[in-house]
Amino acid sequence: MTGDEIVSLGDKHLGEPYVLGTLVPKDDADYKGPWDCAEFVSWLYYQTFGKLYGCANNHGNPHTADAYSDYWGRDANKLGHIITIEEAKSTPGAVILRLAGNGEIGHIVVSDGNGGTVEAHGKEDGIINSVVDGRRWDMGILVPGVTYHPSPTLPFTPPSIVIHRLTSPYMVSPEVGKIQTELTRRGFDTGGIDNVFGEQTYQAVKLFQDSVGLNPDGEVSALTAAALDI
């Protein structure tokens, strides 16, 4: 029951499909997809050490248990051990989480301990290996009962651009106007071009991301900006 085993199992599923909101039977060792990000990570952990984690009911039926990124955040605060992104980046099997909030979409990955990840990324590419750096994260997580073998701590490089997203108060800038202009040009209604990243712009971003196979989290990171030609 080691973090290295979790990474190894995840890598065996590279290339399998992604469907947002799919329900994965955690007790099915032969499952080959489709996955979404939280379902994939919870399945990996159940298969490796036989316990539900990051699910609506961690004591329920593993065949029907519903996993979600914010349930992982809940369990990290109540049951697990929160660590820095640098520590998680250097620890095989550690979880790295971007919270969703307000019932929306976050993202969750497993660290390979060398700065990389194994994750259910989006419907365009499915299960992939990617990187930790250059992305927005909220926390690293270790799960009790799993033995981890951390490497020397690696530095974390945060995103090199401002990630435009729904915040309170709303983000306001000419860059938001550029996002709105490109979304509108592609047929996604932002409610007008007013330089304000509000609810309607957020929903338009999600619809655009889903249309091009990106994780529809409503955040304009480097991948989404590139897809918008910004």
Image (cartoon, rainbow, N blue to C red):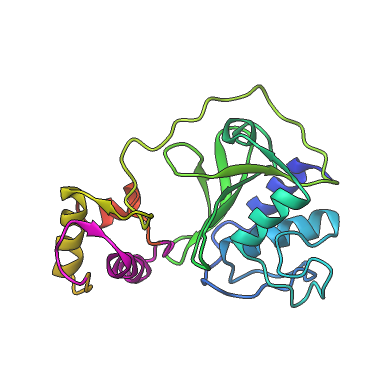
Residue at 59% x, 50% y is: 109
Location of residue 26 in the rendering, given as x and y in whole percent from the top left corner:
75, 68
Residue at the top extreme, as displayed: 152
Q: Is residue 106 left or right of residue 62?
A: left
Q: Is residue 12 something one can see in this rendering?
A: no
Which span is picked out in magenta? Answer: 191-217
For the question of whether residue 43 can be seen, the reply is: yes
Image height of 145 relative to 167, above or below: above
- Decide which of 228, 47 is in the foreground and name it: 228
User: How many marks can you see?
Assistant: 0
Residue 204 lies within the magenta run: yes
- Tell me which residue sits at (57%, 61%) in the image: 37
Residue 189 in picture, x, y percent from top left = 21, 74
Look at 20% across and 48% down and name the residue there.
173
| Front one among 1 and 97 | 97
x then y, percent, for residue 124: 42, 64
Q: Quadrant of residue 44?
A: bottom right
Residue 194, compared with residue 151, is above or below; it is: below
Q: Is residue 117 magenta?
A: no
Tell me if 97 is positioned left or right of 160 in this view: right
Which residue occupies the foreground of this view, 186 or 189? 189
Quadrant assignment, res 70: bottom right
Percent across and percent down for residue 14 are 58, 56
